[in-house]
Amino acid sequence: MKPEQKTADVSFESLLRIFTVPEGPDSTLTKIDEELSRNLNKFLREHIVAEEKPLRDIEKDFSRAAIPEQPEFVSDHTQHLLDTLVSHSVHTSAPSFIGHMTSALPYFLMPLSKIMIALNQNLVKIETSKAFTPLERQVLGMLHRLIYGQNDSFYAQWMHSANHSLGAFCSGGTIANITALWVARNNALKANGTFKGVEKEGLFKAMKHYGYEGLAVLVSERGHYSLKKAADVLGIGQEGLVAVKTDNNNRICPQALQQRISELKAQNIKPFAVIGVAGTTETGSIDPLKEIAHICQQEDCHFHVDAAWGGATLMSNNHRHLLDGVELADSVTIDAHKQLYIPMGAGMVLFKQPDAMKSIEHHAQYILRKGSKDLGSHTLEGSRSGMAMLVYAAMHIISRPGYELLIDQSIEKARYFAELVKQQADFELVSEPELCLLTYRYLPPHVKAALEHSKGKQTEQLNELLNELTKFIQKRQRETGKSFVSRTRLNPQRWGNLNTIVFRVVLANPLTGTDILSSVLEEQREIATQAPKLMSKIDALSAEIVAQSE
Amino acid sequence: MKPEQKTADVSFESLLRIFTVPEGPDSTLTKIDEELSRNLNKFLREHIVAEEKPLRDIEKDFSRAAIPEQPEFVSDHTQHLLDTLVSHSVHTSAPSFIGHMTSALPYFLMPLSKIMIALNQNLVKIETSKAFTPLERQVLGMLHRLIYGQNDSFYAQWMHSANHSLGAFCSGGTIANITALWVARNNALKANGTFKGVEKEGLFKAMKHYGYEGLAVLVSERGHYSLKKAADVLGIGQEGLVAVKTDNNNRICPQALQQRISELKAQNIKPFAVIGVAGTTETGSIDPLKEIAHICQQEDCHFHVDAAWGGATLMSNNHRHLLDGVELADSVTIDAHKQLYIPMGAGMVLFKQPDAMKSIEHHAQYILRKGSKDLGSHTLEGSRSGMAMLVYAAMHIISRPGYELLIDQSIEKARYFAELVKQQADFELVSEPELCLLTYRYLPPHVKAALEHSKGKQTEQLNELLNELTKFIQKRQRETGKSFVSRTRLNPQRWGNLNTIVFRVVLANPLTGTDILSSVLEEQREIATQAPKLMSKIDALSAEIVAQSE
């Protein structure tokens, strides 16, 4: 297994070497390691192929289900990984990759990640993590303070308390949201009289004990798909996740929320949690959190805020007011791997009350003993890595004012891009950016005029053709590999709530310049000409509509 | 933020630099990065303090909840991390760290991890992972084949099928187990007539539709604590997790299992899943999987095998027979971060049937569209990192015969240690190793004699004192920092099923030599002398018991 050897052999001695002897200074892997340290961006640019290879062809390289019977040399395998995997991975940190919430990462996180992985701590218990446990508790404390702004004595009392927890570090926002709703469900169906609580007796007995016909969680129709998973897993059922209508700005309508709650209660269905979204995945909108909090207080509902993406905005004193009311939430989800610029796998859920997580506390004999400070007694996951270290380091090296600059520039850039889109006669801005996310589509002026004049079936037909066009442009642009925007489906009121496919752009990467934004539009305009058949259908229908309306 | 600067400042230009300019060649971080590459073991030995600092003192370094208002230089902060975090972390890869399932890692995984993190792919969808998606599907296929051994055409048909999934990659065994039981629950309460399935309508309506009074999952009393969490989360309730009695070898009694199932059914409680454990966490025992499978077939139960730790044994053709029957399981959990020697955070659940996961499938508008190959439509988690790459690389570089050697030597070493313990007059082997895990305690001959003669209260008293002693030795040994074994609580039949605290040893690290094993016992014997008061209490009670019995 050493590059110097001619053929790889299997012996216990050669195996021991891979645990004790590093790759040689001239090995392929060492060279890559150094190349990455010297110039990450150059490495990625040089090794990731821009133009997309069809997935079917890529799959051919990953088609053997048999585990190899013959070992490979590290250098050979590294070369294989470069050729088949790295070259056909996605350049998520490219300045022109503006379609998802993944951005460039600060340099210092690469070597720090290597240290983190080399230490191989397991955060489930102190015995396998020692200083990492107080570090993670501090990180949770920092995020808690960012949201709830309690005073120093609060954190001195609770941050390191064995029987309390200000939240849970988890692999991502989905687990964070499930954890929050798990806590909310268990608190809503807690022990009472002879009933030992839903955690002990299960949902069926809990419902009978409390006499409810159903349970409900309410969220705007723009809520993240993970909430459906949460409702399924937790036994509430996807139908128990009630979608509340949104206004023109994709924000939940408080009146509609209030009304849905009343309707549910009239049916003897218990609305035990309401979720406010702070940065919807599709449009980046922020719900009116204060108003939701008010309703939750009146209705005795758990108020959870899904700020997986938008939560980082709290770092900016200039923009944190956009999330006013978040401090009234019982729990909040934040993903550090989104706009806190941490590598994938760093989600968090924070709870206002240090004893909120009591309802999901658990113990075991060989770890998580009562009174221990093992983090695992308050997490859905078991064994976990020391990712919190990366959040900790970034908080110190970038600092809050540094994050403020990053957040501010991303919002400014989104506003700039929105203006740019509006200035184009052949594009339509579909949703304005509240944070650094916006949606738009390609809509030439004569088609727009036709759409305005159209009615009923014709509107639908024209819109459907436009959807095809948007889809075509988005796919072709991705395949060409110069830049990437994503797409989603919205129902803008302006066009009679029709299903409308739009481009979706997230401008979190600080390296994305305004020149890139202009060229993204240029490229999309150009790609539209590459679908002459579709364009002529659109033109024909547009002409027909305009002719009829004259 | 660059080491050359005198004070760290906050400007957008300085922030851009941390995204574009690597740490200088002389920076502290670069030096560590290189040190890690040159000699990881030396780095860890030199930087991790052996002797334990009290947690209370460590916490002082992690007590500020305020996010810093002032940025730190990368080098300064790296030094800070070395002093406060790394130095007081746990040397999990030390050959004398034999208390938990964390071991030394192969060298090549460190630079590969850096590549993985630098690529920052998100496996939830192809748009942010491309070649990583087929790679992960192949890794799942490899593990599936290792367990179920289907033929090539099976994998050609299903491994890359958009609407199927051979399993799910997840952060760890807990999520894997929850996923398996989630699938089992949903399949047991699926759509039927007007009922739309538990995933849609929730558990309460499902129970009413099917007319059950309760749900149950059965597992041996040695089942992992995460299963209690799973039962809670899934709405079954912890009481729905029925513990079945084990035999002298800590294996589930099939007759007792059959009987419990009958009892549950008589109460109109639906036993929808049985879990066989392949490598219990506390004793490393393997349940009789074939017999459980037989019962599950008869009773129409989902058969899940928790092989989080023991699953790696399938790599050894010499020992895989220990898991005979695993191929009959409907689902199997395996953690690659245990004995497949991958860094923390690589769990997997495999399903025998490619369409088993249909019951938890989910879709969204902007990703996971129907027909897409996005992995996220079949996972409990959402965003996930490219950890599968490390499993893939290790499978190729170590290969199956390499893993076989690693597994074989670990089992041999455990047998050796068991013999060694038995040879000592003053130690008692409590559980024999089936794999590389065993338990024992310090029990001087005269105390053992007394324990054998004792009855009732006196047995309990003496045993309680021995528990205190075991606890004392384990803690002191950990604090001293030369070696680490863990402890747990068992109920050995030999001593009338009394709560018995034992040392727990896992011998997965290939670097652990037999000399270390001898010195662990030496040290424990020596530490016992450091508790003179406790020892004299034990001696006095022992003498009293022996005197009475004469």
Image: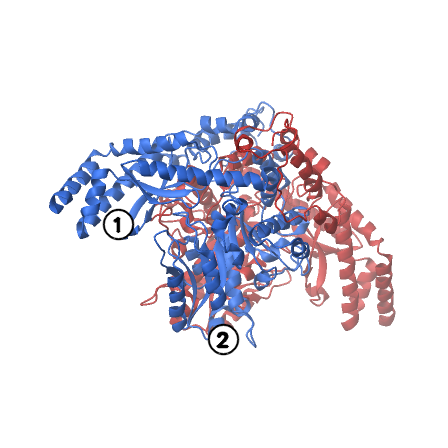
Chain colours: A red, B blue
The quarter of the rendered structure image containing the N terminus of chain A is top right
Type of amino acid under label 2: His
> Is disc 1 in the same subunit as disc 2?
yes
| Nearer the observer, B346 or B20 | B346
Disc on res. B495 = 1
Ranked by sequence position, the earlier of labels 1 and 2 is 2
| Nearer the observer, B74 or A192 | A192
In the rendered image, residue B57, in percent from the top left (x then y), is placed at 36, 34
The answer to whether A180 appears left or right of A68 in the picture is left
The residue tagged 2 is B209
Label 2: chain?
Answer: B
* Helix, strand or loop status at disc 2: helix
**Residue B466 seen in the figure:** yes
Dot 2 surroundings within 10 Å: few (below 14), some, or many (20 or more)?
some
**Residue A273 seen in the figure:** no
Type of amino acid under label 1: Trp
| Nearer the observer, B27 or B179 | B179
Label 1: chain?
Answer: B
